[in-house]
Amino acid sequence: MIHAALTTETIDAPSHEEMVADATAGAVVSFAGVVRDHDGGKSVTALVYEAHPSAAKVVEEVAADIAARPGIVHVAVSHRVGPLSIGDAALVAAVSAPHRAEAFAACAALVDEVKARLPVWKHQHFADGSDEWVNSA
């Protein structure tokens, strides 16, 4: 099973862990990238993620690449777009495999590849009234 999505809805690690759970998998590893209240020494008050029209296809391709690795049972990954608040999950990934080493490696690779390949831009707003765009996932 592969789940890959861009969404404006709330995402969380437990729901992604449930998606990848399987009787054949002895390991489920998940990651949640959460909006923090600071960046570069400045206080962040809000941010908005905007995605290129190809972003949904890219996240599907990344998930499929990771799912094709030997020993991987299931993969789930979602990235939020639109306005997010401090504490919201922006990126959630989960992978299941028979053993922990494969699951940890695949989940790390999934997060790294999404961050490297997904055409998503982050517009951060700071407490001092300034803002910046970051090509980030």
Image: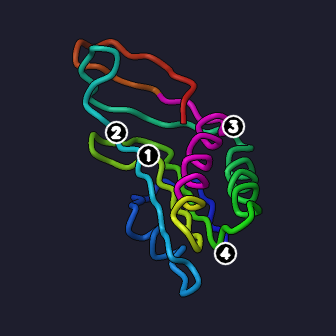
Q: Quadrant of residue 107?
A: bottom right
Name the one closer to the observer, 98 or 58.
Answer: 98
User: Does the magenta portion include 108?
Assistant: yes
Badge 1: few (under 14), some or many (20 or more) residues near its Cα, within 10 Å? many
As measured in the structure, the alpha-carbon distance from the residue carrying label 1 to the one carrying label 4 is 22 Å
SS assignment at label 1? strand
As measured in the structure, the alpha-carbon distance from the residue carrying label 1 to the one carrying label 3 is 16 Å
Relative horizontal placement of residue 132, taking residue 130 as reference (left or right):
right
Badge 3: few (under 14), some or many (20 or more) residues near its Cα, within 10 Å? some
For the C terminus, give its image quadrant. top right
Tell me where residue 92 appears, x and y as whole percent: 47, 54
Residue 35: numbered disc? 2
Tag 3: amino acid: Arg
As measured in the structure, the alpha-carbon distance from the residue carrying label 1 to the one carrying label 2 is 7 Å
* First to last magenta residue range: 104-122
Q: Quadrant of residue 55?
A: top right
As measured in the structure, the alpha-carbon distance from the residue carrying label 2 to the one carrying label 3 is 20 Å
As measured in the structure, the alpha-carbon distance from the residue carrying label 4 to the one carrying label 2 is 28 Å
The residue singled out by tag 3 in the image is 117
SS assignment at label 2? loop
Image marks 4 and 2: residues in contact by CB distance under 8 Å: no
Q: Residue at x 62, y 43 (%)?
A: 114
Relative horizontal placement of residue 34, taking residue 82 as reference (left or right):
left
User: Does the magenta portion include 27?
Assistant: no
Dot 1 or dot 4: first in sequence order is 4
The residue singled out by tag 4 in the image is 1
Dot 3 or dot 4: first in sequence order is 4
